[in-house]
Amino acid sequence: MYTLSVKRDFIARHYLIGGEWGPENFPNSHHYVLALQMSGSELDQHGYLVDIVDVEKHLDEIVDYYKDQMLNDKPEFAGLNPSIEHFARILATSLSESIKADNITALKVVLWENESAWAAYEVKRPESNA
C-alpha cells in the first residue's frame, strides 16, 4: 500500500457552542496544521499514486477558503459545533470529492489545532478496476 501526504498550515477562528468550555466559548484563533494522506495499492502509468500538483491545487483552494475566517459563519458548520472533529470530516469529504485520482482507495485528513491536539477523518473510496 502506497501513501502520499501533503501538509499545509493556516489560521482560522471559531467559538464552541453547546457546553461550558471556558475560553473556547468565545471567538479565538487556532494555528491549524492539515496533513492530507492518500493511500492506494496501485501507481498510475507514470509511477505516481496521484498528481501532487493537482492535489496541492485543491489543498490550497480549501485552505484559502478557511484561512483567516470564522468557522461558525461558514454554511457547512450551520447547526454544528465547530469542533476539530467536525472540521476534519468536512475537510476530508470535500477533498475526497475534488481529488479525482482513481487509484486512491483512502483519503485521510489529520488536523492539528495546537501542538498537542489533533483529530482525523478518513474517507474510504472504492478500488478502481481500471
Image (cartoon, rainbow, N blue to C red):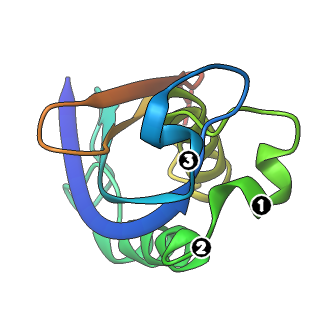
Taking the spot 46% from the left edge, 32% from the top edge, the residue there is: 22
| Relative vertical location of residue 111 with respect to residue 108 in this rendering, above or below | below
Q: What amino acid does circle 3 point to?
A: Leu
Q: Secondary structure at mark 2?
A: loop
Query: Which label sits in the foreground, 2 or 3?
Result: 2
Residue at 87%, 35% (x, y): give it: 79
Question: Which residue is nearer to you in this view: 42 or 116?
Answer: 116
Q: Is residue 51 visible?
A: yes
Compared to residue 110, the image places residue 65 above or below, namely below
Q: Which residue was labeled with disc 1?
A: 74
Give the CA distance from mark 1 to mark 3: 13 Å
The answer to the question of whether label 2 and label 1 lie on touching residues, with beta carbons closer than 8 A, is yes
Residue visible at 63% across and 40% down in the picture: 82
| SS assignment at label 1 | loop
Q: Which residue is mark 3?
A: 91
Q: CA distance from mark 2 to mark 3?
A: 15 Å
Q: Which mark is residue 69?
A: 2
- Comes first in the chain, label 2 or label 1: 2
Q: Amino acid at mark 1?
A: Lys
Pick whichever of labels 2 and 3 is earlier in the sequence. Answer: 2
**Disc 3, SS:** helix
Q: Tag 3 or tag 1, which sits nearer the N-term?
A: 1
